[in-house]
Image (cartoon, coloured by chain):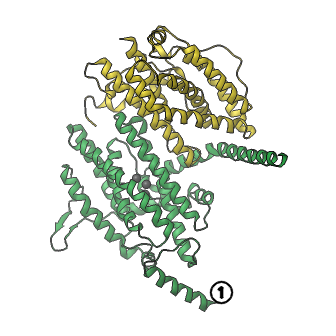
Chain colours: A green, B yellow
């Protein structure tokens, strides 16, 4: 393709997505669109999988059998989300094994939020409420993203995420309505998860150079700051309703804007955790690597057996 | 304690302790699909344990809840078989433990579906489909490993040899089992043993694995004489209820 033809194709592609058409795997797409989406979808997949760890940490210690069942089911859902998303990335020509290798080597990123620890049971409530809550704000938007398979995976995932969010909020509600020890546990978790949850939306718009292109291609539809504001506006009343205090002295309803004003986010912490200096970065990556290494013989055996079976079937049919 | 209550607790404790063990794998499985599959088994088992503890609480009739029963007994008051408290080990050992237990559970619950005890019959009928799936899942993996690579064959044979001594307890009736059989509440364990042996022999054969010859069998779990593992399992299981007694979650 000549350069002019290419530019022409790109212009047509832009008009196509601007008219709210979905891009499907076989359609022509700019190479940068493909790369951007593979990176975004695989990061999302990795986040689902790494995100299992801080919560799975509490499966054996859940305070009641009912909560244990709910938590197992939740973590299992997250594994399922990882699967759909790896499949969505594969529709763009990526290979799941390569993507996983990139995660294990530390080359690929995943959501930094999962590098924070879950020392208490209330963290399971806070993660469901805030982390799944923040994920939903982002993912509801992605249900309308321009790449068809990603949008469809998101529709399915969003339903489950909002269930997780309610379940997490319900854990917090039970704690906040409980004994002083339980309420303290809930407040402590909110104190630790509030700011990292706000950071989940990414840098401020002026520090987010790739966003414009994503918006143009209808991958994203709202800016980081817009999504963050939406999340805050939705979540603050939820905290108030159960009698917990959002740990931000500058938080104030702004009548004129029709939004909450909020304090300065510690972006240094955000970049530190991304750089690998969160409390659990090493632990998380180590856990994934150990699981992968210990699982190698299992995967090899499954492949070897499948090959033997295929060969046997072939022999049988040729003998028949 | 009434014999029936103790019998229900045995069933419940087996399901809970094995579910708890499987819960340890969640997030650490060898491949995402199998992580999901094993978590599913854990979910089923803990769900079953809840139905059984609720029934045990009714039999106890002193205001105890399912959580009181699961979370407030010490090691000597747990009646699960030793098999289910054994360490996960590698994925192969977990699968073999599952295979031995699931196969037993399959025949046991199949028979419990027609228990003269109405509640137990109901619970068994609700659980049987899940248990049948577990038994199929673990048997398929035993075959895959036995007939997979030489490494998988060796690993899974080692697990079979290792766990063999815990199989006997499942089939050795004591006075409670006998009383249950007598009352038509539970099947005759000799019959379950014969069905189990036939199935296990068949699967190990397909998997090109050897049936261990050793005949020494451990016992004690059913009467509260446990290995060192159970205390640690309970330490995690019961941590919250012990650290924050009497609270609602
Ligand atoms: Fe998810
Ligand atoms: Fe997500
Ligand atoms: Fe979720």
Is residue B14 in view?
Answer: yes
Name the quadrant of the C terminus of chain B: top left
Vertical placement of A37 versus B214: above or below?
Answer: below
Q: Is residue B29 left or right of residue A175?
A: right
The chain carrying label 1 is: A
Which residue appears at 37% of the width and 76% of the height?
Answer: A206
Residue B89 in sight from this viewpoint: no
Image location of residue B202, percent across then percent down: 69, 27
A186 or B58: nearer the viewer: B58
- Give the percent coordinates (x, y) of residue A28: 58, 78
Q: Residue most toward the bottom?
A: A4
Q: In this view, does A20 lie above or below A149?
A: below
Q: Quadrant of ligand 1?
A: bottom left
The residue depicted at 28 percent of the width and 23 percent of the height is: B64
For label 1, the SS is loop
Total labels: the figure holds 1
Left or right position of A276 against B54: right
- Quadrant assignment, res B65: top left
Other-residue count near label 1 (Cα within 10 Å), few / some / many at <14 / 14–19 / ≥20 = few
Residue A99: name its quadrant: bottom right
Residue A254 location (% of width, % of height): 17, 69
Which residue is tagged 1? A1
Does residue B144 appear left or right of residue A195 in this picture?
right
* Relative image position of residue A289 (x, y in whole percent): 58, 49
Position of the N terminus of chain B by quadrant: top left
Residue occupying image coordinates x 76% and y 45%: A308
Q: Which residue lies furthest to the right in this view?
A: A319
Is the CB–ligand 2 distance for label 1 below 8 Å? Answer: no
Which residue occupies the foreground of this view, B63 or B85? Answer: B63
């Amino acid at each position: 393709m000549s350069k002019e033809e290419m530019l022409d194709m790109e212009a047509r592609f832009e008009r196509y997505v601007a008219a709210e058409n979905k891009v499907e795997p076989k359609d022509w797409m700019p190479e940068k669109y493909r790369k951007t989406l593979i990176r975004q979808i695989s990061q999302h997949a990795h986040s689902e999988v790494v995100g299992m760890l801080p919560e799975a940490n509490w499966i054996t210690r859940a305070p009641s059998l009912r909560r244990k069942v709910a938590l197992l089911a939740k973590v299992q859902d997250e594994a399922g989300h990882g699967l759909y998303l790896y499949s969505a990335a594969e529709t763009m020509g990526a290979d799941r094994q390569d993507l996983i290798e990139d995660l294990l080597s530390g080359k690929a990123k995943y959501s930094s939020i999962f590098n924070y620890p879950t020392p208490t049971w209330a963290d399971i409530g806070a993660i469901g409420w805030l982390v799944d809550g923040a994920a939903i704000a982002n993912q509801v938007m992605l249900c309308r993203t321009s790449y068809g398979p990603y949008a469809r995976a998101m529709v399915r995932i969003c339903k489950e995420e909002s269930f997780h969010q309610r379940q997490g909020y319900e854990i917090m509600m039970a704690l906040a309505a409980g004994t002083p020890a339980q309420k303290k546990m809930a407040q402590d978790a909110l104190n630790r998860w509030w700011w990292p949850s706000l950071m989940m939306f990414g840098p401020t718009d002026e520090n987010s150079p790739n966003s414009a292109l994503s918006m143009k291609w209808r991958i994203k539809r709202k800016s980081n700051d817009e999504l963050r504001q939406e999340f805050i506006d939705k979540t603050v009343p939820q905290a108030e309703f159960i009698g917990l205090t959002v740990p931000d002295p500058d938080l104030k309803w702004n009548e004129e804007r029709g939004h909450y004003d909020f304090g300065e986010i510690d972006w240094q912490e955000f970049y530190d955790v991304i750089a690998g200096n969160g409390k659990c970065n090493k632990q998380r990556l180590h856990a994934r690597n150990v699981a992968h290494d210990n699982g190698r013989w299992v995967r090899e055996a499954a492949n070897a057996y499948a090959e033997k079976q295929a060969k046997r079937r072939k022999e049988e049919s040729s003998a028949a | 304690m009434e014999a029936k209550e103790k019998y229900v607790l045995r069933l419940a404790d087996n399901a809970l302790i094995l579910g708890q063990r499987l819960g340890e794998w969640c997030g650490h499985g060898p491949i995402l699909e199998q992580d999901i599959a094993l978590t599913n088994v854990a979910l089923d088992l803990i769900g079953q344990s809840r139905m059984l503890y609720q029934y045990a609480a009714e039999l106890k009739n002193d205001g105890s809840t399912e959580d009181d029963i699961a979370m407030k007994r010490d090691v000597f008051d747990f009646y699960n078989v030793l098999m289910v408290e054994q360490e996960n080990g590698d994925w192969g050992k977990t699968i073999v433990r599952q295979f031995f237990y699931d196969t037993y559970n399959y025949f046991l619950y199949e028979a419990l579906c027609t228990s003269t005890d109405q509640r137990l019959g109901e619970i068994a009928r609700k659980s049987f489909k899940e248990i049948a799936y577990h038994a199929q899942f673990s048997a398929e993996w035993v075959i895959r490993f036995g007939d997979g690579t030489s490494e998988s064959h060796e690993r899974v044979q080692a697990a079979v040899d290792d766990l063999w001594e815990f199989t006997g307890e499942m089939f050795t009736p004591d006075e409670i089992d006998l009383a249950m059989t007598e009352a038509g509440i539970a099947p005759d364990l000799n019959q379950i043993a014969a069905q189990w042996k036939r199935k296990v022999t068949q699967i190990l054969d397909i998997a090109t694995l050897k049936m261990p010859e050793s005949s020494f069998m451990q016992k004690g779990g059913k009467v509260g004489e446990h290995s060192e593992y159970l205390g640690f399992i309970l330490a995690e299981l019961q941590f919250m209820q012990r650290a924050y007694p009497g609270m609602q979650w």
